[in-house]
Amino acid sequence: MKLIKLISALLFLTCLSNGYSSADVIVSEKGITGGKDTTTYVSPFREKNERCFKCHGQNRYQYTNENLGREVKALMFQERIIDRNKFYQANHKSFSCTDCHSEDYTKFPHPGELRMEMSYNCLDCHGGDEKFAKFKFEKIESDYKKSVHFKLEDEGYTCWSCHNPHEYKISIRDSKNLKETILYDNNICLNCHSNYDHFQLLSDKEEVSILKQHDWLPNQATHFKSVRCIECHSVVNDSVLVSHQIMPKEKAVRKCNECHSKNSLLMSSLYKFESRAQRRDGFFNGIMLNQSYVIGANRNGYLNSLSIIIFSIILIVIGTHIFFRMRK
């Protein structure tokens, strides 16, 4: 718990240095998030969902105990508390609670067997649907099955281990929201890898310090605020929005030139929203350079060719001069 607070504090400071004000950033034991978006979605199921939120939307709930003949107040289990505002800003905001959960949950007390209810995964809804074809969920699942995370499925790992169905939201990256994307995506990783209580649900390994594990990284704070964990820990896949094939730690990127070069891995992951023409021409990579220093990113292909031609002409002139001097 101390570790995630330390990392959150570090990310908090980097947020401030990136132009956020302290009022724009929310820090908690669960990580750090941008606090700018306060718009609440008006759901057609808002009243229906409130049947669930009246208990699951706060720290305590109240009910009538017929055996005791009185009102009872109790604390809600933290993992079962759903933030209304986050839900109505998330991708599933247009859903009714019972679209995913059994209608039997409308009864209270809830039938005990519902605790064993099977959860949907992403492809149960998104697979084979033309409306979602552009997101390539089938390709994502194929990559995920090659991931180190897939090996943990027998221990209870699912899509929801990273993508909380009640809060998860995704937006297409561009030059305006890149900082928010980096913070949001990194917190998904930190929710497990910097919270040992969550980590223990899936692994019996000893607690690992994220900061200590990355102490070899030059300018560690700058890297943490400028790139996402998956940039170094997943196989680059330019055909999907986000790579889901997480590599074993020994295969993680450690060579500087894999990112800090013209053919940077970042070009196919974090900066894939940049057009290929912009990547080629170099002069248009100012956005990239403002976010993360990439050696050669502002190199222009046309100037490269021109410089080679000029250099070749100079060599020919010098060679010709030497040739005639030797003849005389």
Image (tube, rainbow, N blue to C red):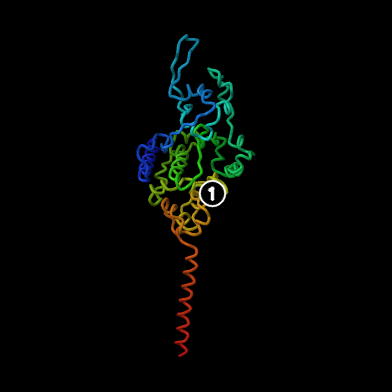
Query: Which residue reaches farthest right?
Result: 128
Position of the N terminus by quadrant: top left
Residue shown at the point (39%, 40%) measured from the top left: 7
- Disc 1 residue type? Val
> Does 159 sit left or right of 296 as displayed?
right
Query: Which residue reaches farthest bottom?
Result: 328
Residue 277, relative to residue 110: is it above or below? below
Measured as percent of width and height from the top left, residue 10 is found at: 37, 42
Measured as percent of width and height from the top left, residue 268 is found at: 52, 51
Q: Nearer the viewer, residue 234 or 301?
A: 301
Q: Residues within 10 Å of mark 1 (few under 14, many from 20)?
A: many
Residue position marked by numbered label 1 in the rendering: 235
Q: Nearer the viewer, residue 29 or 71?
A: 71
Quarter assignment of residue 144: top right
Q: Nearer the viewer, residue 66 or 298?
A: 298
Measured as percent of width and height from the top left, residue 76 is found at: 45, 23
Circle 1: element type: loop
Residue 70, relative to residue 123: is it above or below? above
